[in-house]
Amino acid sequence: MKNVVILISGRGSNMEAIVQACQREGWPARIAAVISNKSDASGLAFAARHGIPTAVVPHTQFASREAFDAELARVIDGFAPDLVVLAGFMRILTEGFVRHYEGRLLNIHPSLLPAFPGLHTHRRAIEAGCKLAGATVHFVTPELDHGPIVAQAAVAVLPDDTEDTLADRVLRHEHVIYPQAVRWFVEGQLAIEQGVVRHAAGAAQVRWGG
Ligand code: NHR
Ligand code: GAR
């Protein structure tokens, strides 16, 4: 069994989708903990209801990013993780933290990387007149939103989309590709060769949506 630790900052709907797929599909994994940097993250209640240990490491109580990341890593490592999953986790992580979890740290970013790293991706895609938007699951590297790509989902940007309607359309596909990617990892199906992620059995690493 692989231990998976999930980091959230808020709603945690991607975390929920991962917890539910893990239970429903009987992955060789357990969700060992859900950890938030915000005590009011609503996802913590879902985790507790499902019997998953939770912890809060409030970033506001640390003098530096290094100090926050050191405490976060100490709490995470208490759950002996094989994989750490960022699911709407909103703090940029230091190089030291990322190196500690190299090759076992995943994120989902709400854009078709390498377009629009950083924040406010849906607003920026609409403003740029993009006709496609989407989400990317990637291994985390020290450079923000630049790590090896595990899976992507693409959706249409519609003429009357707002930031919220586009975010909702993308999120529905996040809830499919993120559990899928985590499942591939815990099954040992992912290999990184020269910065490119391949699925051992050739599963499609792309999803097209309406
Ligand atoms: N850290 C590293 N080193 N590399 C990545 O690829 C990371 C990361 C930490 C988080 C998620 C990411 C996203 O998918 C992620 C990827 C937060 C910010 C941000 O600017 C940017 C990207 C992501 C998460 N955070 C502000 C900060 O000062 C705080 C913003 C807030 O609290 O609302 O850390 O988009
Ligand atoms: C998701 O859309 C995720 O891709 C995005 O925030 C949302 C979190 O929703 N992540 C980021 O923007 C990271 N900077 P959730 O908490 O319901 O999973």
Image: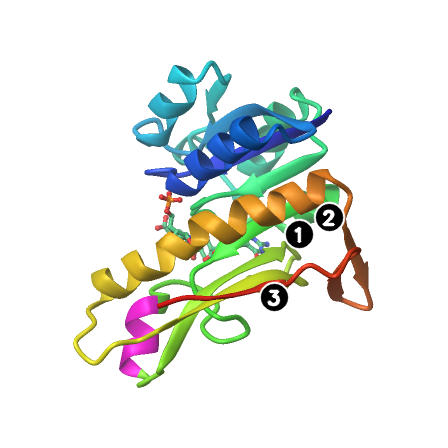
Q: Which mark is residue 146?
A: 3
Q: In the rendered image, which residue does mark 1 sit on? A: 95
Q: Is residue 141 above or below residue 100?
A: below
Are discs 2 and 1 less than 8 Å apart at CB? Answer: yes
* Residue 12 picture location, percent across and down: 38, 38
Q: Residue furthest right?
A: 193
* Residue 57 picture location, percent across and down: 47, 28
Between 134 and 24, the one nearer to me in the picture: 24
Determine if residue 155 is in view.
Answer: yes
Of the numbered discs 3 and 2, the one sitting upstream in the chain is: 2
Q: Main secondary structure of the magenta part?
A: helix
Distance between the alpha carbons at the discs numbered 3 and 2: 14 Å
Q: Which residues are magenta?
A: 122-127
**Assess mark 1: CB under 8 A from ligand 1?**
yes
Q: In the rendered image, which residue does mark 2 sit on? A: 99
Residue 126 quadrant? bottom left
Residue 45 horizontal side relative to residue 164, left or right: right
Of the numbered discs 1 and 3, the one sitting upstream in the chain is: 1
